[in-house]
Image: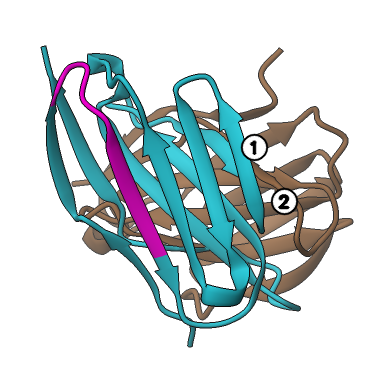
Chain colours: A brown, B cyan
């Protein structure tokens, strides 16, 4: 009964390809997020969605396109992958938009070769 | 923007030792969380503690919001405590967590 689950856990792909990472939460939360962890372990917000609406886009290249078909899902599609996109991507969710506890998925390690 | 500074950056302990990790932040926040990233990369929630003191087993945390810092105490450390400990804060009206750079902890048997 994983609370926030991401698939796949590992993704190895060539430059120029398009790939998607899926995220689902069963906590009944209405806000979902994507965070990126770089090679130095630094974690930074990419996107926030509340009730399927985008509320934060943190100057992410438009090759990254999140999609939220419903409150429980937030997928991340990446076009024309570049070497610099290699990182660990975390999905998270929280109840409400401000000041509530966030819970994270297990991460997706993306390697672009 | 807000600065979130964690100290020390690295810490090596002998099993059984106690330690204190610190998180300083430069603005008022309405959320503060501590996470443990284990060697497998999972981010595990330790505490949701915008203010006050909480305890969970060998771990406890205190946030003094008026002085803009939080402390994480680990007592009787075990090898399974190894990993990276992150503090993350949320500003009022910001809709996102801002992470510190972490404290890397190694507990030796």
Q: Is residue A79 magenta?
A: no
Residue closest to the eye, B80 or A105: B80
Report the residue at 70% width, 45% height from top: A93
Report the residue at 53% width, 65% height from top: A46
A1 on left or right of B60: right
Residue A60, above or below A73: below
A40 on left or right of A11: left
Residues rendered magenta in the picture: B14-23
Residue A78 visible from this viewpoint = no
- Indicate the position of residue A69 as horizontal and vertical percent values: 83, 47
Name the disc covering residue B70, or none. Answer: none
- Indicate the position of residue B100 as horizontal and vertical percent values: 38, 62
Q: Which residue is mark 2?
A: A32
Give me the chain letter of mark 2. A
Residue A75 visible from this viewpoint = yes
Q: Is residue B19 magenta?
A: yes
Name the disc covering residue A23, or none. Answer: 1
Q: Residues within 10 Å of mark 1 (few under 14, many from 20)?
A: many
The CA span between labels 2 and 1 is 9 Å
Cβ atoms under marks 2 and 1 closer than 8 Å? yes
């Amino acid at each position: 009964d994983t609370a926030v689950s991401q698939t796949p856990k590992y993704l190895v792909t060539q430059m120029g390809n398009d790939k998607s990472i899926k995220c689902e939460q069963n906590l009944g939360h209405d806000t979902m997020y994507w965070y990126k962890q770089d090679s130095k372990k630094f974690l930074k917000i990419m996107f926030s969605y509340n009730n399927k609406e985008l509320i934060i886009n943190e100057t992410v290249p438009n090759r990254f396109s999140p999609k939220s078909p419903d409150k429980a899902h937030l997928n991340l599609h990446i076009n024309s992958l570049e070497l610099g996109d290699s990182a660990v991507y975390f999905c998270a969710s929280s109840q409400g938009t401000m000041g509530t506890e966030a819970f994270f998925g297990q991460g997706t390690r993306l390697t672009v070769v | 923007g807000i600065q979130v500074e964690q100290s020390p950056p690295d810490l090596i302990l002998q099993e059984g030792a106690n330690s204190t990790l610190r998180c300083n932040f430069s603005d008022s926040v309405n959320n503060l969380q501590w996470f443990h990233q284990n060697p497998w990369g999972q981010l595990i929630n330790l505490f949701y503690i915008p203010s006050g003191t909480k305890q969970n087993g060998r771990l406890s945390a205190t946030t003094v919001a008026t002085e803009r810092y939080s402390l994480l105490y680990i007592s009787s450390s075990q090898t399974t405590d190894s990993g990276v400990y992150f503090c993350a804060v949320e500003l009022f009206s910001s809709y996102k967590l801002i992470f510190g750079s972490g404290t890397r902890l190694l507990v030796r048997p």
